[in-house]
Image: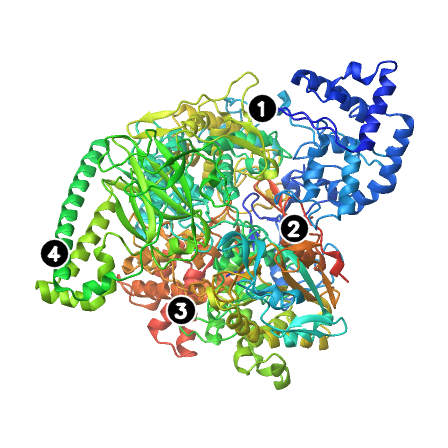
Amino acid sequence: MIRHHVTGEEAEMSYFSKTETVRDKIAGAFRAMLGPFTLQTVFPFMTDGAPPTRALSRSLLAGLTSLVFGWGATWLPADDEDAGHAFYRETVFPLLEANCFECHGGGDRLKGDFRITSRAGLMRGGHFGPGVNEDDPSESVLLRMVSYEDEDYQMPPKGKLADADLAILREWVERGAPYDPELEIEGEPGEAAGMVVTDEDRDYWAYRDLSAPVPPDVDDADWEQNPVDRFILARLEEAGLEPNGPATPRQLVRRVFYDLTGLPPSPKEIDSWEAALETDPGQAWRSLIEDLLARPQYGEKWARHWLDLVRYAETNGFERDNPKPHIWRYRDYVIDAFNRDTPYDRFIIEQLAGDEIAKPTEASYAATGFHRLMQWDDEPADRKQHVYDVLADNVLVTGETFLATTLGCARCHDHKADPISQKDYYSFMAYFHGITPYRTEGTLLSWAADAEKVAFEKRREERVSAERKKSAALEAEMLTWIEGSGGAGEAGRDGPEAVVYVDDARGEPASWFFTTSRPAPGWKEVGERVKNWTRAPGGFGKKGTPNARIGATWDTEAIWMRTTFGATAIPETLVLEIHHDEDVEVYLNGHRIYVATGYTRDYETVKLGRAALDAFQTGRNVLAIHCRQTAGGQFIDASLRTGTTRNDSIAELIRRGGKKLERDLQEGTGRNIVKEWRDTQAKIVAIRKELPGTPINAVTEVAEPGPMHVHLRGSAHAPGDPVSPAVPVVMTGPDDGQPGIVPVERYGFRSSGRRLALAQWIAHPENPLTARVMVNRIWQHHFGRGIVPSTSDFGKLGEDPTHPELLDFLAASFVEGGWSIKDLHRLILTSRAYRMSSAPDSANLVQDPSNKLFWRFDMRRLTAEEIRDSILALSGSLNLERGGPWVYPPLPTEVLATASRPGKGWPVSKDESDHFRRSVYVHVKRSLRHQMLADFDQAPTDSPCAVRFATTVPTQALTMLNSAFVNEQAVAFAERLSQGGAVTAREKVTRGLELTLQRSPTPEEIAECLELIDRLRSEHGLDDQAALQRFALLALNLNEFVYLD
Amino acid sequence: MTSFLVSIVHPILIQSIPILHIMNKSSHFCGNVKRREFLHTVGGGFPALALTGMLGADGYLNKAGAASAGGYENPLQARPAMNPAKAKSVIFIFCYGGPSHIDTFDYKPSMYGMDGKTVEVKTFGRGGKKNEGRIVEPKWKFRQYGECGKHVSDLFPNVGRCVDDIAFLHSMTADSPIHGSALLMMNCGSVISGKPSLGSWVNYGLGSVNENLPGYVVMLDRSGGPISGAKNWTSGYMPASYQGTVFRSEGQPILNLKNVKGMPREEQRVLIDSLNHLNAGHLEQRYDNTNLAARIASYELAYKMQSTAPEAIDLDTESEETKGLYGIGAGQTDDFGKKCLLARRLVERGVRFIQIYSGGAHNDDNWDAHGDLEKNHNLHAGRTDRPIAGLIQDLKRRGMLEDTLIVWGGEFGRQPTAEYEYGTGRDHNSYGFTMWMAGGGVKGGVSVGQTDELGSAAVENRYHVKHLHATILSLMGLDPNALTFFHGGLDESLVGIEGASPIREIMA
């Protein structure tokens, strides 16, 4: 066996194992080679053991191995060759066949891209590199895997091989892994070949530069209303299809109201717009579009399309499924962005890097909530992996939303269809690598202008000081009384001695390991051993910081520190005394037990809660702290002890003295001094929590992200080659470089600038994907289907554009027009194509049944939100209040009962008017969806949704016929019909149908409804109002109500 | 809440339906095939015919698996399996919280007498990773049962008598020992949420044979749902139509089955008739739109469901002997017994996938025995032992066991050592645990796989949750590696991109 260690200056060389057979074999091989020379003359070290120089040893050993083992070459003495073949055939093959072939080459699947059935496959290797290490066979991946030494690499997965089998494999590898050519099974040529981006790849339609096509000539020049129509008509004429005639004015009004606002027009609106459209169609249509685009309901409707793409949800999922505090500001940001017509390039940049732009605003910070929408497990089984699961979600959403590229496919292996390599994937992920992991309480920052912040903090400290003084005075008073009385208080002092686990610099400071550069994510875990950290006694900071005793200097932006202590029993209480700089996190055995923002001026005593006690364990414990600071003096130090204090904390005294002490104190001092003291304490805590400005659940980032690697097979525990931030190679020109990255530094703010670089590259006017993707989405939501039907996949597994020139025309206009989404609406909506009727045409249906060429306008079902909002609009209950925190309308008890804590997490809004807000404001809870919205195909919460399904199932009918919500609204609707002048049943029915269908009902329809009312009255004994309520329910169930022409 | 679907419109192609996508074997992974080849275009059909075809089927739509007339296709219609199926339905008894394998079916004789001894063993549970612990010996005696002589603890004396019909998997492993993610893993194949659940895959692959009942039913414990609630029966990125429907054994079995304003059935009939007339008029001018026709049909189906579903849960027609077999009326087994009997009745009515939760809410409301193991497991086994045995026996005597697959297990097992300094509570264990299957093409009286002598980790024939999933799908006649759904640029499958083989050792 050959060992080849060349790491470090003291590289130790041990050349041969004691295995005589192998040694003999090598020696034999050399004798054969060398002829008359002796081994000693050529390789003196082989016998005397003196180490050669490293370079020499390398070259010699390389020669040795290649010659002796025949790696790559076939040099083996004939008899050895036969012996090798026989060994494989008789001993190794049956073993591999029984245990490895199923996944690694015998069948039709190849796991880990690794084929063990041929020597070429073995040496080419799979995701973890070559199966056998040429330089050091004993270090071969194959042997490591079968050894079961590492929890993450264990083969075969069904169980460890018997020792005898392991010995066979070891011998086989040591013998150079000979195969019997007769038994070799080769894979397909090109198997596991690396990915190379070719010119042809770059020439794929989606990556090509935007062209600016000229609208084609058409035969029927009169048909055209705007350039869009020429692209549509040209294709129709080419195919010999006759486009549909125009929809009626009423159909158009209803269509465009829903399209732009998601709400039905009022009877007045529909009447006046109908009249206007009949008088001056062109002008009236343009006015109507302007009217609707200017309404705030426009943003509410179109924001929802965007929220689908970014899998917007307001909780974290998993066991606790906690809300993401203030994340609704992101939803409001999107609504506002649409309403303000924020240019799309800016919309991109604000979401991806609203914190890194030159002049961030409250809105741009809120926009970065984009990075905080994903599911997040607060107790993942594999913390490291989950950090990357979250980042992977970011990559997936960013790729699909902005670039219509399914990057997610390349997490475990190169993309199978598109020229996106695994390296591209992790290079893309590196843009997000600096993002701080999410936290239970959200990653809140409070937005305020700098001056406002400074003033606020000063004021806050003054207020805390004032309360402290008050508190100290009260404590002194109480202690004086207690000592004087010699009563209950004294008894209270005789508790168990405090156990100090970790002492601070005021006493005998603990010895800490610390580092000032970001460590690997596991730094706070018990099982982790830190490397290259410095050891020093506690009290880290800069000299001159008030109340600080410095054990070691710390003057950088951040510090990570950890210390260990032993414990024999779990204490009943735990107290942390901590003096910290702004923003500190304290962990016990990997669990976060305390977090605080802002700095302290002295040690503070924190009684730790259940979480800390749960994290505490007997035996070895790890206390770990991460602290940051941005300006001024700095200091961090802490101690951890049991609840009994050496400083006679008044809190402990009162706790143990109980009610009696409180009473005695009240009698003795003449006032409720304990309550006064408690109030002061609470006030201090409350003031310390106050932050200036607006709390925003935003992205936060470290200035220097750690190194990023390719993750073999998607596993964070199997790092491959290092990567730097880069966009997919195929999306760059052959000579283009990668976007430049400039770290961002402002007052109190540092960031890597990576996301900004990515955002600017995506939002660049010359990025052809970005504009194509967005104009296609806008088209999709107007026509029901994109020009590229797979709107989030422009790759090879997606579909080709039906009208590529139109797509480019729209994209080019979009960019040239300054990325205005409202202008794009104007362009599309003023086309004749948009205003066609949806009626069927037998001849066209035969030729183009799916309306691929847009010969008509497609009917569509209302979305989940539109159905609920329209019902509320018809009943007159709709509350159009805008923005703000989410609302909780009532849910059926049966739905609440599906939660593990029925009712928890869905506190029905107290203000009843909130029950009738638009659906976009209804809380989106991952584990408990609003039943009606979910059943009508609202987008799922965990993956981006570019195209919603539109299912039709009987349970929807049950909801529409039987649910409390629809029935209550039907009652309100009936009530509304009885008001406003309608007296007879006929008048009420007519009005009801008008409101529901936005057209005048036919006499037959009215008769049908009147007959229903009659029958319900005469045959089922309902009174007039009850019968009218049934009619109202019927109206809400009409197909025409939920389908648009 | 929704299930059985009448139509799905995927606006990628208007009026097109993503049909079952069965990959050929040479193109696993993402495939190189244009998606549109898999999108079935439904062109201008004749809704009147579609309606007739649909309503005329009288509840058992298209038994032959043929599409409805006129190009109208119900994606949840019964579909022939890819391969010959051994099982038609699955009843998954989910012991939420994680039952202790060494106290139930994984006999560890050498542990008796070891109580309190400290042992070096690597464990990972709620309390983090530990290297040693105090042994809690199995708290129940084991006896041998059946011809196979299987050892079963005194927690399951009734199930013990069924061991000759059961295949035990003693070497199960999962990716997470934490409830939230482990539940998702067991139900949806991944610790990350958003993937469709096993029942959704079954319905997607096979459709439903009774359109008047959901194809995928979930019955929850009285104390509440499992952690993550509806995430456990979600259809994920598939249409909502494939998600599980929560079914209650008493009262209204399905949400909104009865009108809240107390509308009697006859009155509702009148209303639906009027609705049909008006909708028919609307359809006349839009004759090509099958979705409108589907919506009309959905009201008829809903109307029928309102009588079918209550009939399904009406146990009055069952004999006292049968009820007794399930432990109905016998105190602690009454509730679970009703659910098991209901499961049989649903299987008889063609429901494909039924999941019954033993345990709900948190802590000792389910099998999560962190504190007092004996109290906890006596309670939950006591509630379920007889009903489960009753279910097996009842199915068997009716000749239904051979094509009904019963699966028993939790999201993980429990540690051999104590979680706390005192007491018998055990922490979670995903390194090794036991599940079992019965009926539906599974060998009886066999046990495969082994944990170490403490039961702390699987050591022999280790199986992962995905192998369990692959086995269930295979028994249902579905190829786990070819049953895929195109989503986000990937042909997603329940068993993941690398695939998984079924556990052939237990397949008859």
Going by the numbered disc 1, the residue's amino acid type is Gly
The chain under label 1 reads A
Q: Mark 3 Cα within 10 Å, few/some/many (few <14, many 20+)? A: many
x and y percent of residue B39 in the render? 63, 45
According to the picture, the residue beneath numbered tag 4 turns out to be A477
x and y percent of residue A274 in the render? 35, 45
Whether residues under marks 2 and 1 lie with C-beta atoms below 8 angstroms apart, the answer is no
Q: Nearer the viewer, mark 2 or mark 1?
A: 1
Whether residues under marks 4 and 2 lie with C-beta atoms below 8 angstroms apart, the answer is no
Which element type, helix, strand or loop, lies under badge 4?
A: helix
According to the picture, the residue beneath numbered tag 1 turns out to be A8
Which element type, helix, strand or loop, lies under badge 1?
A: loop
Whole-angstrom CA distance, mark 4 to mark 3, is 73 Å
**Front-lying residue, B285 or B457:** B457
Q: Is label 1 on the same chain as label 4?
A: yes
Position of A917 with respect to A151 (left or right) is left
The chain under label 2 reads B
Q: Nearer the viewer, mark 4 or mark 2?
A: 4
